[in-house]
Amino acid sequence: MKYILIWILILGTLFGARVKALQWKEGQTFSQYLEAKHIPLSVLNDVSNDDQKFLSEITNKQLFYELEDENGSLLQALIPISEVMQIQLSKTKTSNTYVFDIIPIVYETDEYFGKIILSNNPYIDTLNTTHNQKVARRLSSALKGVINGKNLHKGDEIDFIYTQRTRAGKPCLVPDIKIARVRMGKKEQFIYVDEDGDGFAQTGKAVAYTVKGKQKVVYTKRVPVSSAQSRFGMPLRHARITSNFSYRRWHPILHRYRPHHGTDFGARRGTPLLAVNDGIVSFSGRMRGYGNVVKIKHKGGYESLYAHQSRRRAKVGQHVKKGQVIGYVGSTGRSTGPHLHFGLMKNGRWIDPMNVLGKKSIKTSKLQKFTKYENVTTIKYKNVAIKGAKTNKAKLLRYIKENAPSYVWED
């Protein structure tokens, strides 16, 4: 099928046939075309179901070609249905019947040179010089983003190379601008154009690509605190308060005012002492006026103190649960009788225990860090050379040196 138009022209010359270029009538169906050419509709019986859909893809005013004999009878028709495929309707030599087929369109592709002297703007001046609207449009698109139109003045020169596909000597499809040079006074700028028609000031272009992989992600999330941790219990059963928390209390032994950083609970010697919440024992030993002492660190910045014990049961570093026995009531240290002095600190400061014990004193939720690995897509860029940039620059300089004229297309 290659060079089919050339052979049509040759055969037409030898046998008196002629080639006509026509436009497809608006709204005309393929069946109506057959009837207008006095071709039996039975030719459609040979069209496969898959090819039937292509009959409706002939566009209005589509340029197509007919080969007629000296009597005006149709020998062959070539009707494009896309940029690369066409319907071929041809008459057989023996039976005078017609055969339907879909074949590739063969174009001729040639290189052309353009030289524009600005008097208006690149688009209008290119159109007036080359008489090819598509060339003017593609050149303007290639210059956009590289050349600032405000810097162009009357008398500036634009030289460029492009390729154009033709069929029967007529330009078809979109031309490809390869390279351009803009001379503005004594300055010049080369524009290198890629296969998409985009212009660049350098011989390469930045191309984006994606990289997929795993990435560690650390995030915080508010999670609920268990009910066991959200409420403090009492440090002993059947609690009886004998002295409250105070910043100024009359000391029964020292007989002077002293702060009382805790709450005293009256109880018999040997009464079990209970951890008010889950935690880790931070101290277990004697502590001056407090006698035998156990201290427990809890979540939320709290630390509890159990003083005057007769016997300690908890050890340093031990994990204890809420309600677990950690010692027994006594009267060690500076004490007037068996009792528990219970103290509670929040972030290193003494607070009134009775504002916390038996109440929701720890927040019901907290911020917690989580780590996970997610599938991520990262966009990176690499520099890719524009195909033929250096070769096209050498060609363009040769055209400019030879002072070659612009190719002018027929209207």
Image: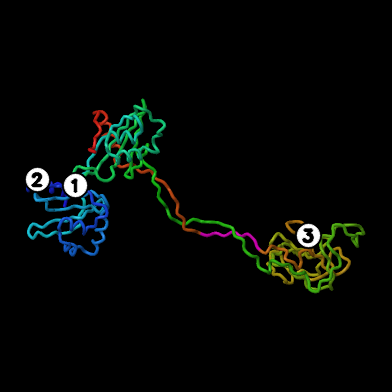
Q: Where does the magenta region start and end? A: 365-372
- Specify the quadrant of the image occupied by residue 192: top left
Amino acid carrying mark 3 in the image: Ile
Name the disc covering residue 403, or none.
Answer: none
Amino acid carrying mark 2 in the image: Thr
Check disc 1 and report the residue beneath it.
21
Name the disc covering residue 351, or none.
Answer: 3
Q: Nearer the viewer, mark 1 or mark 2?
A: 1
Q: CA distance from mark 3 to mark 2?
A: 113 Å
Q: Assess whether residue 370 is covered by the magenta stretch.
A: yes
Kind of element beneath mark 3: strand
Kind of element beneath mark 2: helix
Residues marked 1 and 3 touching at CB (< 8 Å): no
Main SS, magenta region, reads strand
Check disc 2 and report the residue beneath it.
13
Q: Nearer the viewer, mark 1 or mark 3?
A: 1
Please tell me which of labels 3 and 2 falls first in the chain.
2
Q: Residue at x 86, y 63 (%)?
A: 334
Kind of element beneath mark 1: strand
Residue 391 visible (yes or no): no
Please tell me which of labels 1 and 3 falls first in the chain.
1
How far across and down, in percent of the image, does residue 14 sit? 7, 46
